[in-house]
Image: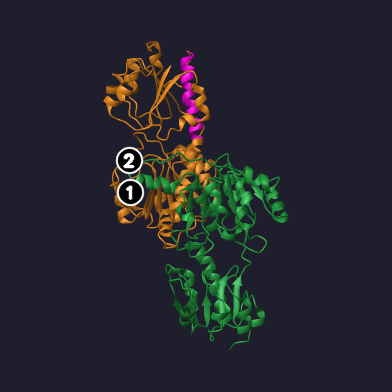
Chain colours: A orange, B green
């Protein structure tokens, strides 16, 4: 089949062991990021299979209607960036493993790395050393501090475990089910959402972005945080009310943030207010971006292609399409 | 007593709760770093007690001979920067607690922060984002990789625990006594020194610097490391043979380093090769530099001053100096 892969920024996929799964197919890899429908329609004119890396490119109706040969979109995890109803109408199968049970350890590790980087002011200290200034200030020890995990899902549970190994007091918040699970695994839930934001030295967000969680962290929540507290977001930017984080950091509660996710990605606007704040550490959505994580994820994505090609598609998110799928 | 404190770079000590222990004394705090004998002798000419922060300033005989009023040096941990014989000769008592049971969690935590920062290229990725370039490359996951702990002492044991919690295979290389402790704690010991360096994806050094450990990591050790491997040094620079690390990184084995300690500290030479290599993350000896660890360390250091002032000195390193100077 003719397979097109979008947004492989560093041409990493060809170097993975799992790329061998595509042997026998005709594969085209695009390394730059393009969102314009004309340019995408031209690039994908012959594609029978489209491989997406996370939510990097939006696949909307206007584009889908210009891709007459497309039969399959293969990707992994959630798909707010795909017009699935239009795929179904046009006879395009969407396969997306929801990887039950396997947390993204890469994301959990990055979240913890950002916690230490922020508590020890590593970026500023590194810059100070490179400028001949030696030390730039005094950091803080994690041991004994309170780590808040909001909420206790797959990744949150892993981060909570890291906190415990570092001698931190771990507190969970989230829906009743996630608080129950935290309690069952030996982590105390907070008494209330207010108490959670007030007592935590570090709050790390670990939630899916769905309608119920959009803007779930409010201006008032952030204002309850301590002046020396840290907020970490490696999940999704819109979990926090629009504009609330920048305003909160300017007001000094919380005192610091470490952010891996943005409203618009890729973030190419160097004037974005978070990038200018001295008390914010910003990374370019690196959560899942490790070679090891790619091996795991693209094994799933490529297996979906192989299964489809063999006439036995797996992880189909729009099974009703199979009645009138394009041949 | 007249107490002088050197090298408090960020005027942090006054803001510690432990500082109240000095309430009865006349305290002078110096924030800049000075090593020349003349200005130090001038600054300390009236000092009766001298507080040192780690090994930041060397206290040698020519300086000690010019400090007639000095009775006490109060600090913590090892003292290769102090001429102990000269202190004793001059009747200056050195108090330095070395029997602390609590490991430096601040150093262990920094080590872990450097491991993740290097494996995920955080400084480079941040710079790329700020330059409007979005991502700069693809990192590595720790889970499933091999963490090599060289020196299973107090800090090494804590870092090994972090590695275990992160789902890494932990491999220990250490002297016989501490190797037995590592095995008892459930970690694997490397079959040989060669295997230790060849198999580890991350090697972290946790050794004291003494004659037996100076240059203990050799060019040959580093050359055995994988091109994708990372070496982390939050202990002391001279544990690695002079020049071996820079040469090894240039040769590509190991592929990366994260370094908190340097031959000369404070390092102010911006031309230092380690500061100018894209595959190296360097921090300015931050291991012990946290507010919480300062509270613990300076509570002890100030207790030593009060005990001395009360005529009941504690943690005395050179008891033969006691009573020589009034």
Looking at the rendered structure, the number of numbered marks drawn on it comes to 2
Q: Secondary structure at mark 2?
A: loop
Q: Does A298 appear in magenta?
A: yes
With respect to residue A311, does A271 lie above or below? below
Q: Is residue A88 above or below residue B185?
A: above
Residue A58 magenta: no
Q: Which residue is mark 1?
A: A275
Whether tag 1 and tag 2 are in contact, CB under 8 A, the answer is yes
At horizontal 41% and vertical 52% (from top left) the residue drawn is: A230
Please state the horizontal and vertical placement of residue A241, each as a whole percent of the image.
31, 43
CA–CA distance in space, label 1 to label 2:
10 Å
Q: Nearer the viewer, residue A284 or A198?
A: A284
Between B25 and B280, the residue placed more toward the observer is: B280
| Image-based side of B176 in relation to A255, left or right | right
Q: Nearer the viewer, residue B247 or B40?
A: B247
Residue drawn at (48%, 65%) of the image? B266
Please state the chain letter of the residue tagged with numbered disc 2 in the rendered image.
Answer: A
Q: Can you give x and y, in whole percent of width and height, for residue B273 in the image?
A: 48, 55
Quarter occupied by residue A269? top left
Q: Chain of mark 1?
A: A
Marked residue nearer the N-terminal end (1 or 2): 2
Q: Residue A291: percent from the left, percent from the top?
A: 49, 36
Residue on which the image places disc 2: A267
- Tell me the quarter of the image containing the C terminus of chain B: bottom right
For mark 1, does the 10 Å Cα neighbourhood hold few (<14), some (14 to 19), or many (20 or more) residues? some
Magenta residue span: A292-310
Asked if residue A103 shows in the view, the reply is no
Magenta residues, dominant SS class: helix
Q: Position of residue A39 (x, y in %)?
A: 29, 26
């Amino acid at each position: 089949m003719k397979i097109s892969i979008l947004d492989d920024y560093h041409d990493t996929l060809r170097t993975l062991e799992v790329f061998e799964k595509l042997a026998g197919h005709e594969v085209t890899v695009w390394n730059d990021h393009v969102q314009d429908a004309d340019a995408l329609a031209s690039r994908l004119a012959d594609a029978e299979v489209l491989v997406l890396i996370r939510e990097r490119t939006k696949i909307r109706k206007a584009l889908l209607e210009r891709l007459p040969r497309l039969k399959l979109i293969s990707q992994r995890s959630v798909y707010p960036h795909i017009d699935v109803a239009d795929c179904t109408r046009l006879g395009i199968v969407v396969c997306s493993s929801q990887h039950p049970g396997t947390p993204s350890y890469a994301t959990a590790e990055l979240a913890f790395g950002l916690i230490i980087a922020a508590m020890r002011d590593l970026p500023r200290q590194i810059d100070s050393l490179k400028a001949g200034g030696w030390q730039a200030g005094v950091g803080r020890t994690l041991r004994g501090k309170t780590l808040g995990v909001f909420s206790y899902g797959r990744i949150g549970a892993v981060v909570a475990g890291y906190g415990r190994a570092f001698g931190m007091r771990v507190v969970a918040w989230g829906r009743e089910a996630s608080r129950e699970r935290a309690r069952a695994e030996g982590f105390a839930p907070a008494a209330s959402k207010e108490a959670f934001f007030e007592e935590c030295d570090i709050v790390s967000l670990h939630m899916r972005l769905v309608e119920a969680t959009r803007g779930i962290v409010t201006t008032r929540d952030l204002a309850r945080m301590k002046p020396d507290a840290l907020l970490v977001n490696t999940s999704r930017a819109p979990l926090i009310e629009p504009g609330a984080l920048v305003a909160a950091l300017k007001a000094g509660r919380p005192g610091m943030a470490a952010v891996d996710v943005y409203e618009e990605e890729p973030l190419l606007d160097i004037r974005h207010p978070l990038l200018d704040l001295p008390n914010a550490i910003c990374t370019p959505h690196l959560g899942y971006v490790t070679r090891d994580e790619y091996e795991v994820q693209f094994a799933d994505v490529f297996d979906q292609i192989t299964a489809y090609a063999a006439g036995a598609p797996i992880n189909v998110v729009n099974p009703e399409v199979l009645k009138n799928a394009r041949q | 007593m007249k107490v002088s404190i050197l090298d408090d770079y960020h005027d942090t000590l006054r803001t510690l709760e432990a500082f109240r222990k000095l309430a009865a004394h006349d305290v002078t705090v110096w924030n800049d770093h000075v090593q020349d004998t003349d200005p130090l002798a001038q600054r300390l000419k009236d000092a009766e007690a001298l507080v040192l922060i780690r090994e930041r300033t060397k206290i040698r005989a020519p300086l000690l001979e010019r400090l007639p009023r000095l009775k006490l040096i109060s600090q913590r941990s090892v003292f290769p920067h102090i001429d102990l014989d000269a202190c004793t000769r001059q009747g200056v008592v050195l108090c330095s607690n070395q029997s602390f049971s609590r490991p430096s969690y601040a150093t262990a935590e920094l080590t872990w922060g450097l491991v993740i920062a290097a494996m995920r290229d955080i400084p480079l990725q941040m710079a790329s984002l700020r330059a409007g370039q979005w991502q700069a490359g693809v990192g590595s996951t720790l889970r499933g990789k091999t963490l090599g702990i060289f020196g299973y002492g107090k800090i090494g044991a804590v870092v090994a625990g972090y590695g275990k919690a992160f789902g890494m295979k932990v491999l220990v290389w250490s002297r016989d006594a501490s190797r037995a402790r590592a095995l008892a704690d459930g970690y694997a010991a490397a079959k040989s020194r060669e295997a230790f360096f060849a198999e580890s994806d991350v090697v972290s050094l946790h050794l004291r610097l003494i004659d037996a450990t100076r240059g203990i990591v050799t060019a040959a050790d580093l050359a055995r490391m994988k091109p994708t491997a990372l070496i982390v040094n939050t202990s002391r620079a001279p544990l690695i043979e002079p020049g071996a690390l820079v040469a090894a990184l240039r040769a590509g084995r190991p592929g990366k380093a994260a370094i908190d300690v340097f031959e000369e500290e404070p390092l102010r030479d911006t031309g230092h090769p380690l500061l100018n290599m894209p595959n190296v993350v360097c921090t300015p000896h931050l291991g012990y530099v946290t507010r919480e660890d300062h509270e613990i360390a300076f509570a002890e250091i100030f207790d030593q001053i009060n005990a001395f002032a009360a005529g009941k000195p504690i943690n005395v390193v050179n008891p033969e100096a006691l009573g020589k100077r009034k």
